[in-house]
Image (cartoon, rainbow, N blue to C red):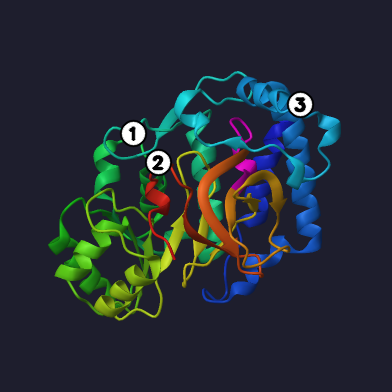
Amino acid sequence: MNKRLDMYLCYTIKNSCKSVKNLYDNSHFKEHLTLEGEIEFEKKALDLFAYQSAHNPVYRAYVQALSRTKQSINSSLSIPFLPISFFKTHTIRTGDFKPATCFESSGTSGERPSKHCIPSIQQYLENATANFSEFYGDPSRFCVLALLPSYLERGNSSLVAMADHFIQLSSNPASGFFLNDFQGLANQLKINESIGTSTLLLGVTYALLDFAEQYPLSLQQTIVMETGGMKGRRKEVTRDELHAELIKAWGLTSVHAEYGMTELQSQAYSMGRGIFYPPATLRVILRALDDPFDTWDWRMHPGRAGAINLIDLANHATQAFIATDDIGRFTGDGGFEITGRMDNCDIRGCSLLVV
């Protein structure tokens, strides 16, 4: 792989692996959202655009179809974003490499899954660890309990790969997956609570709701993190309704959440109220629902709803500039909310919930 492009991942991992003194202090989220940090990200995004528009055949054709040139791109707001649906119909690759693995989206029955083939599983896991560490510190300090039944059954999920990596990093031998063993999960949570073990319960939405209904507990030492996704198993609920149910069942102060998808190698995190913050490798740009070239960043138009574009520097070997079908709004402090989906789009597991 081009040595110059390797610098992107090395930079983001180096600058995002920072321990957190106070888990609930938001200030460290925004270190990379300073003017200096934004200028650095902007430069890397423009350099990466120049590289991918030349060496990614699908993206190059898309940029040419829009009659865009390198000279016409002077900011991240003017970069063309590839519609995410291309991951369903094409192999999205920058340069020539043999895929180490191909992640696939879950989707629902009858849908064509998205496929994201990456050159290095180790780079994906290192970046995922760096993103998580930016918000929560080293994952090794948690007992990691994963309730991801539908993802486990599929076998080629990026979320499962990330959860398994965190489980392997954990210094707690009780860390592991719980496919359908609610009783075993409840027993382990009770043990962890009784001895004061810091615990991360990572779960798909429908499974967390099922578990909460059957096993109300007092979880004071546990971070409950939902990843979204009803998978057609339950009636859709808003994120506020979901969090209220889990808070009531388990005596929580807040429910955390992860925003990621098959097509990304980076993840954003929420520590409550459904407000997500991007890690150092990721930026969110909104576009008007009726004009894909009317775009704005988090400093502009807080509260105005728009479709979500993503810049993921970790996707240097595939596609860093992605136009998703999610709808969101900025909160004015570098955070963003997911408020729904565009009409006539496939349902995605990561964004079934609306605010």
- Residue 20: percent from left, percent from top: 57, 69
Q: Which residues are magenta?
A: 309-319
Q: Secondary structure at mark 3?
A: loop
Amino acid under label 3?
A: Ser
Q: Is residue 103 above or below residue 335?
A: above
- Residue 175: percent from left, percent from top: 30, 57
- Residue 181: percent from left, percent from top: 15, 56
Q: Secondary structure at mark 2?
A: loop
Q: Label 3 to label 2, Cα distance in Å? A: 28 Å
Residue furthest out toward the right: 71
Q: Secondary structure at mark 1?
A: loop
Q: Quadrant of residue 73?
A: top right
Q: Residue at x 30, y 36 (%)?
A: 155
Amino acid under label 1?
A: Glu
Image disc number at residue 215:
none
Q: Residues within 10 Å of mark 3 (few under 14, many from 20)?
A: few
Between 342 and 221, the one lying in front of the other is: 342
Q: Quadrant of residue 193?
A: bottom left
Give the residue number, with chain letter if any, for mark 2.
Answer: 346
Give the residue number, with chain letter if any, for mark 3.
Answer: 67
Question: Do the numbered discs 2 and 1 sit on residues whose CB atoms are within 8 Å?
Answer: yes
Q: Residue at x 27, y 72 (%)?
A: 192
Q: Residue at x 58, y 76 (%)?
A: 25
Amino acid under label 2?
A: Asp
Between 136 and 330, the one lying in front of the other is: 330
Q: Is residue 344 above or below residue 140?
A: above
Q: Residues within 10 Å of mark 1 (few under 14, many from 20)?
A: few
Q: Earlier in the sequence, mark 3 or mark 2?
A: 3
